[in-house]
Image (spheres, helix red, strand yellow):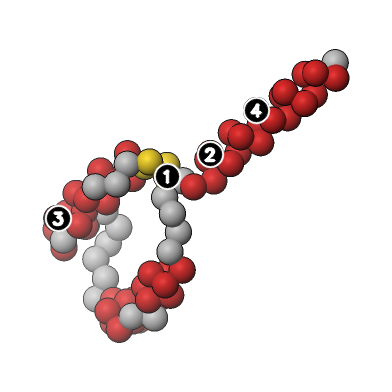
């Protein structure tokens, strides 16, 4: 289980968009309603729930860093 910042992976993003499994689920109508992940794949649903609650986006650190820099720069000139 990963804790901390997410690191985007371009190869995984492309593979997920072009997979046969995705085509079958999305275009042929074999898709469960939203929130039914506990029924279709409970192990994956549990993993995703824990992952989404324990990790943060990769841009969060950058936004905080920029905000602190602005406060320091403009605080010194006032």
> Residue 22, image x and y in percent?
32, 77
Q: Nearer the viewer, residue 35 or 11?
A: 11
- Return the residue at label 4: 68
- Mark 3 crowd level (few <14, some 14–19, many ≥20, 10 Å Cα): few
Gap between marks 1 and 3 measured at Cα = 22 Å
- Return the residue at label 3: 43
Gap between marks 2 and 4 measured at Cα = 11 Å
> Residue 29, image x and y in percent?
29, 78
Q: Residue at x 80, y 24 (%)?
A: 74
Q: Are marks 2 and 4 in contact (CB under 8 Å)?
A: no
> Residue 61, image x and y in percent?
53, 39
Q: Residue at x 38, y 41 (%)?
A: 4
Q: Quick check: 44 above or below 72?
A: below
Q: Residue at x 59, y 33 (%)?
A: 64
- Return the residue at label 1: 5
Counting residues from the N terminus, which is met first, the one under dot 1 or under dot 4? 1
Gap between marks 4 and 3 measured at Cα = 40 Å
Which residue is at the far top? Answer: 78
- Mark 4 crowd level (few <14, some 14–19, many ≥20, 10 Å Cα): few
Q: Nearer the viewer, residue 18 or 38?
A: 18
Q: Is residue 59 visible?
A: yes
Counting residues from the N terminus, which is met first, the one under dot 2 or under dot 4? 2
Counting residues from the N terminus, which is met first, the one under dot 2 or under dot 3? 3
Q: Are marks 1 and 4 in contact (CB under 8 Å)?
A: no
Res 61 label? 2
Q: Residue at x 36, y 73 (%)?
A: 16
SS category of the residue bearing label 4: helix
Counting residues from the N terminus, which is met first, the one under dot 1 or under dot 3? 1
Gap between marks 2 and 3 measured at Cα = 30 Å
Left or right, 5 with respect to 70, comes to left
């Amino acid at each position: 289980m990963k804790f901390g910042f997410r690191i985007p992976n371009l190869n995984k993003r492309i593979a997920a968009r072009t997979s046969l499994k995705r085509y079958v689920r999305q275009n042929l109508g074999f898709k469960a309603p939203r929130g039914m992940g506990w029924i279709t794949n409970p192990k994956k649903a549990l993993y995703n729930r824990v992952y989404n609650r324990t990790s943060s986006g990769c841009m969060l650190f950058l936004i905080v860093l920029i905000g602190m820099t602005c406060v320091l720069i403009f605080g010194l000139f006032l």
